[in-house]
Image: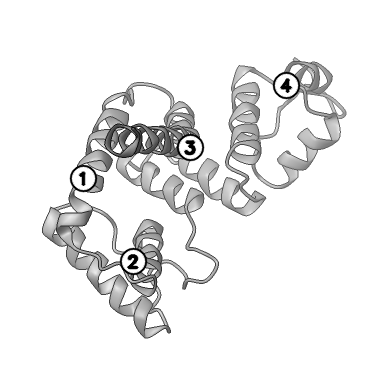
Amino acid sequence: MQISELSDRSGLTVQTIKFYIRQGLLPRGSAVSATRAEYGPAHLERLRLIGALREVAGLPVAAIRTIVTAVDDGGSGLHDLIGTAQHALGGAPAEGPRPGAVPPDPDLRAAREDVDALVRELGWRAAADAPARDLLAAAFVSLRRLGFPVTLADLRPYVRAAADVAEHEIARVDDAAPRARTVQSLLVSTVVYERVFTALHRLAQQDAAARRFAP
């Protein structure tokens, strides 16, 4: 198909498609003349992935480039691909350090050490520079500053829920599917279903409170 048809089928302007090509997010089409190139289904699929990463996840161009580069790297395994996508999807909180950096705030540094100890105790194989470590450390700091101690007993229900959800999500990943589809699956699980989980948590909390406290 020509770029005009690719534009019609993707819902994107020709200018936007050309911008993605210049930014290295979309491969160039196959040249058939000095002024014309042909595009195929893979280009349309890539545009859908880019659209999801921009519109659903709200990622900047640089983060999207990191992900699509990993998608195109056939030498890396799915574990590495998922790790790369998570780094791009889940940056450190605004008040926190860069993922893997030493936190300057002593409270945050202590919380990060607690998170690392928790991950070791659980036996979870999570990268040392995983952004989620810093997100969890920031949450620990907030809880402690509000007067709520963080103990394993308090965390255990959340740990079980997180592990169950993660097992469910990874079990649904088809390792024979195209790598771009794996990233889309992760995007849905991480960005959209986290909102579903938050909403369900709040509804369940209301139900539990009603059953315990309502007349």
Q: In what element is the residue under mark 2? A: helix
Q: In what element is the residue under mark 3? A: helix
Query: What residue is pinned by disc 4?
Result: 10
Q: Earlier in the sequence, mark 3 or mark 4?
A: 4
Residue 149 in the image: x percent, y percent?
Answer: 25, 68
Q: Quadrant of residue 17?
A: top right
Residue 89 in the image: x percent, y percent?
Answer: 50, 48
Examine the rendered structure and indicate whether residue 36 appears above or below residue 100. above
Q: Earlier in the sequence, mark 3 or mark 2?
A: 2
Residue at x 13%, y 53% (from the top left corner): 123
Residue 172 in the image: x percent, y percent?
Answer: 31, 23
Asked if labels 3 and 1 touch by Cβ distance under 8 angstroms, the answer is no
Q: Give residue 195's mark.
A: 3
Query: What residue is pinned by disc 2?
Result: 140
Q: Earlier in the sequence, mark 4 or mark 2?
A: 4
The type of residue carrying mark 2 is Phe
Please identify, in this view, whether the residue under mark 3 or under mark 4 is nearer the observer: 3
Left or right of residue 162, residue 17 in this image: right
Q: Give residue 113's mark.
A: none
Asked if labels 4 and 3 touch by Cβ distance under 8 angstroms, the answer is no
Q: In what element is the residue under mark 4? A: helix
Task: Report crowding for label 2: few under 14, some 14 to 19, many 20 or more residues within 10 A (C-alpha).
Answer: many
Q: In what element is the residue under mark 1? A: helix
Q: CA distance from mark 4 to mark 1?
A: 43 Å
Nearest the viewer among 121 and 14 is 121
The type of residue carrying mark 3 is Arg
Q: CA distance from mark 3 to mark 2?
A: 21 Å
Q: CA distance from mark 3 to mark 4?
A: 26 Å
The type of residue carrying mark 1 is Pro
Residue at x 42%, y 83% (from the top left corner): 105
Query: What residue is pinned by disc 1?
Result: 157
Q: Earlier in the sequence, mark 1 or mark 3?
A: 1
